[in-house]
Image (cartoon, rainbow, N blue to C red):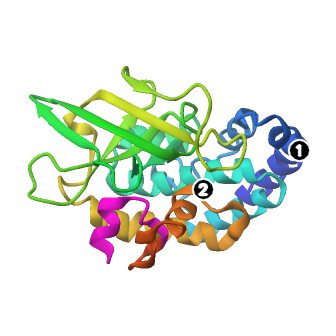
Amino acid sequence: MSYRNAFSRVLSDVIAPRAERTGREGSFPRGAVTALGEAGLLGLTVSADLGGGGRGPAEAAEVVARIAGSCPVTAAVLQSHYAAVAVIEACGSAWVRGEIAAGRHLSSLALADGAYGAAGATATRSGEVVALSARKREVVAAGEADSYVWSSSPLAAADGLTLWLVPAHAPDLFVPARPDGAGPHGSATSTVVADPVLVPADAMLGEDGAGHEVVRRTVLPWLLALRDAVGAAAVHPSVAAAESAPSARAGAAQLSAVAPAATALR
C-alpha cells in the first residue's frame, strides 16, 4: 500500500472522526499519533535504508496540510515531529532513526529558551555525561513526545549553539501539569524544564557549536515548508511566537524564537 493510501485511511478512519472531540476537550491526539506511526507516517521522512518512507519536505507538507484541514491539533504535533526528525536524520543515531521509521517514536523541537531576553540553556560536561539546564518554551507534545531536539550553549566552542537529543522520560525533566503554550488546544504545547537533565555526551546532534547551521539549513526550511503548506491557521508555535517578537523583524524571523540561532541568522 502506498503511503498516500495508508494516510488517507488513517485520516478518514481515525483523525477526522476524533478531531472535534480532540479540540473540544483539549486532549492530546494519542490515538492519531499511534495510527500515524502504524501506517508509516511518523517515519515518512526517514531513510528507506532504515525502513522509513524516504520522502522529503514536500510529501511531509502534503500530509500535514491534509491533516490540518481536519485536526489542527494533530497537524501541529506532526509539524514539530517532522522538523525534529529532519535534524535526527542529519545528525542522529541509526537506532533512534530506526525507531522513528518503525512508528514507535515521536519527537519534537525544544529550541526556544525561557522568556524573551532570558538567559539561554547551558550545558556542562563531566566525563561522558552532560548536564543540560534550561527552561524551554513553546514545546509541542511536551510530556507526550519520546524525545526533544534540544538546544544549549556549546560545551567548548567559543560561541554558537549545540543541539542534543534528549529522552523525554529522562529524570529531572519537568512539564507543568497544565499546558501553558500557545499551540492549538490539545497539542500539549507547554514549557519543559531541565533542572538539570543528564544525557550521555553522545546525545549531541552534530558538532559542538554548529547548531546554528543545523537550524538555518535544516530546521528553518522544514518549518517554513510545513507552515506554507498549512497556512497561518496551524502554524508551528515556534514560528508564531517569533512573528510577534521584536527580534522577528531581523533576518529569518520565523524561527527567531530560538534566540541564539536568530542572532546568527541576521
Query: Which one is in front in this view, the residue at disc 2 or the one at disc 1?
Result: 1
| Frontmost residue, 80 versus 190 | 190
The residue that label 1 is drawn on is 20
Q: Which residue is depicted at the point 19% across and 54% down?
A: 207
Q: Amino acid at mark 1?
A: Glu
**Residue 176: % across, % down:** 54, 28
Does 84 sit above or below residue 202? below
Q: Quadrant of residue 263?
A: bottom left
Q: Is residue 256 magenta?
A: yes
Q: Amino acid at mark 2?
A: Gln
Which numbered dot is residue 138? none
- Left or right of 258, for residue 227: right
**Residue 26: % across, % down:** 76, 37
Q: Which residue is depicted at the point 70% across and 49% down?
A: 184
The residue that label 2 is drawn on is 79
Does 59 sit above or below residue 26? below
Q: Which residue is depicted at the point 64% across and 62% down?
A: 235
Q: Is residue 1 magenta?
A: no
Query: Is residue 210 shown to the viewer in this render?
Result: yes
**Residue 161: % across, % down:** 24, 56
- Left or right of 155, for residue 255: right
**Residue 89: % across, % down:** 41, 54
Instruction: Write the start and end of the magenta stretch as one range.
Output: 254-266
Predominant secondary structure in magenta?
helix
